[in-house]
Image (spheres, rainbow, N blue to C red):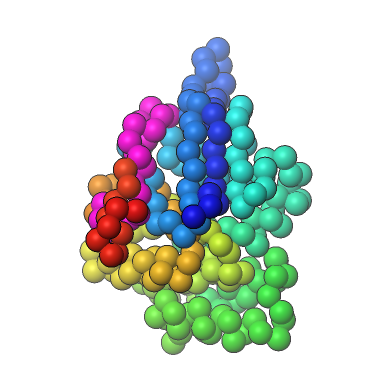
């Protein structure tokens, strides 16, 4: 499989008065198309910084971030926003659904912003996505009427609105009970089975066998990058 994400000697530093804080230190790695990857580490380990660099939300101090054959941090902000909308779906920890729009309207707005899906097919695609995540009956409701797990499912559907190749989820089950968390994980596994590249960022311990790889960060460095058993029982 070819690499869909590449980091080459990436450093991200922040100036804090007279001190310099390194969130990432000379990190190199790649993620292959279709992989299911967990990036884990304690608070301050650099995992959120890595997520922000991969999605183009933040910029490296030095080094190169290449995603889908694009040096994303060489794009201007307008082109980067458009590129991100077409290629990466982001699932935020606290959902970030627009409260004054219904669930269906949240998804349709994501399509409108990117204009990557034909207008005639948007409503049907929205229904298909909501059915896929199991909340089609809640499409006409506002986010406040849904449980936390239902809102997370809605956030996943919105992240998939423009059929991105990559889905990135930031602490996607951190605020969910165990049963709901398991159902969200099942959705991610299904997306991987359909060929999506899925990256989960979390501080919690993970079931390693669920993922193709588990990347562990500490103090801004990769301390482990372990391939796990695939669904067939063979090493990835």
In this rendering, would 103 be left or right of 35? right
Q: Residue at x 54, y 29 (%)?
A: 9
Which residue appears at 58% of the width and 58% of the height?
A: 88
On the image, which quarter does residue 87 sit in? bottom right
| Horizontal and vertical percent position of residue 193 | 41, 69
State the extent of the magenta-drawn residues as a range.
208-225
Q: Relative to 204, say whether 44 is above or below.
A: above
Vertical relation: 21 (above or below) 170? above
Magenta span contains residue 4: no
Which quarter of the picture shows residue 177? bottom left
Question: Which of 82/109 is in front?
Answer: 82
Q: Position of residue 204 (x, y in %)?
A: 28, 47
Relative to 65, residue 161 above or below: below
Q: In this view, does 76 lie to the left or right of 126?
A: right
Q: Can residue 135 be seen in this view?
A: yes
Q: Which residue is drawn at 31% across and 43% down?
A: 226
Q: Give the mark count.
A: 0
Q: Main secondary structure of the magenta part?
A: strand
Q: Which of 177 and 219 is in front in this view?
A: 219
- Magenta segment includes 222: yes
Query: Quadrant of residue 39 in the image?
Result: top left
Residue 141 visible in the current orientation: no
Tell me residue 172's x, y (percent).
38, 58
Residue shown at the point (53%, 49%) measured from the top left: 3
The residue at the far top in this view is 18
Q: Position of residue 40 (x, y in %)?
A: 35, 43
């Amino acid at each position: 499989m070819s690499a869909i994400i590449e980091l080459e000697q990436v450093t991200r530093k922040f100036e804090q008065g007279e001190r310099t804080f390194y969130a990432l230190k000379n990190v190199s790695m790649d993620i292959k198309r279709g992989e299911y990857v967990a990036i884990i580490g304690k608070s301050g380990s650099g995992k959120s910084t890595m997520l922000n660099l991969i999605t183009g939300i933040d910029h490296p101090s030095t080094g190169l971030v290449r995603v889908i054959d694009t040096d994303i941090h060489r794009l201007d902000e307008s082109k980067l926003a458009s590129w991100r909308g077409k290629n990466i779906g982001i699932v935020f920890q606290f959902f970030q659904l627009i409260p004054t729009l219904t669930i269906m309207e949240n998804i349709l707005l994501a399509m409108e912003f990117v204009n990557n899906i034909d207008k005639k097919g948007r409503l049907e695609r929205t229904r298909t996505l909501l059915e896929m995540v199991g909340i089609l009956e809640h499409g006409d409701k506002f986010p406040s009427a849904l449980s936390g797990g239902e809102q997370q499912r809605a956030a996943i559907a919105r992240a998939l609105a423009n059929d991105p190749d990559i889905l990135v989820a930031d602490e996607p089950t951190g605020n969910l009970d165990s049963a709901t968390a398991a159902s969200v994980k099942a959705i991610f596994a299904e997306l991987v089975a359909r060929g999506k590249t899925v990256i989960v960022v979390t501080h919690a311990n993970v079931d390693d066998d669920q993922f193709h790889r588990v990347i562990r960060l500490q103090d801004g460095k990769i301390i482990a990058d372990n391939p796990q058993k695939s669904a067939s029982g063979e090493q990835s």
